[in-house]
Image (spheres, helix red, strand yellow):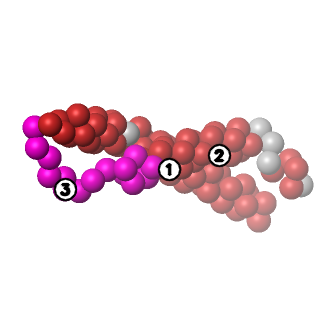
Amino acid sequence: MESQFLSGPLLYLLIAWGVATAVFLGLLFRRSLLSSHEDDQIFLDAAEEHMAQEQRELVAKINALSRPIMGTGILAGVLLLLIAGMWLKEGLKGLL
């Protein structure tokens, strides 16, 4: 019965949830790596403008990751709720 339960739509949802969660965690890891190179406060003179430009580019990359992180996080959460609902529905159907 266990193998029948993990076939069909539920199996595909579990695979989709796994992929979405892996992408979400990968994006979080990437942002974490970028954030570790970011300086909170730097004091530069005009000769070190290239360092300031690097920091601006780094902040832009970190900010660009915020929407994909939010999207994949929401997707993973919705898929998890859908899987839990289907699992409960099948479990309750087995009791009746």
Q: Which residue is mark 2?
A: 18
Tag 3, which secondary structure? loop
Q: Residue at x 23, y 34 (%)?
A: 50
Instruction: Name the amino acid type tagged 3.
Output: Gln
Out of 49 and 72, give the one closest to the viewer. Answer: 49
Out of 25 and 38, give the one closest to the viewer. Answer: 38
Left or right: 33 with respect to 17?
left
Cα–Cα span, label 3 and label 1 = 23 Å
Residue 60 visible in rendering: no
- Please identify, in this view, whether the residue under mark 1 or under mark 2 is nearer the observer: 1
Instruction: Measuring from the top left, give residue 24's x and y in whole percent.
Output: 51, 46
Q: Earlier in the sequence, mark 3 or mark 1?
A: 1
Left or right: 92 with respect to 7?
left
Cα–Cα span, label 1 and label 2 = 16 Å
Location of residue 47 with respect to 77 vertically, above or below: above
Q: Residues within 10 Å of mark 2 (few under 14, many from 20)?
A: some
Instruction: Measuring from the top left, give residue 63's x and y in whole percent.
Output: 30, 41
Magenta residues? 32-46
Q: Which residue is mark 3?
A: 41
Q: Residue at x 38, y 39 (%)?
A: 65
Q: Are marks 1 and 2 in contact (CB under 8 Å)?
A: no
Instruction: Name the amino acid type tagged 2.
Output: Gly
- In the rendered image, the residue lying farthest to the left is 46
Instruction: Name the amino acid type tagged 1.
Output: Phe
Asked if residue 95 is among those painted magenta in the image, a careful observer would answer: no
Q: Which residue is mark 1?
A: 29
Left or right: 55 with respect to 93?
left
Instruction: Measuring from the top left, give residue 72's x and y in whole percent.
Output: 47, 42
Q: Are marks 3 and 2 in contact (CB under 8 Å)?
A: no
Left or right: 36 with respect to 78?
left
Q: Residues within 10 Å of mark 1 (few under 14, many from 20)?
A: few
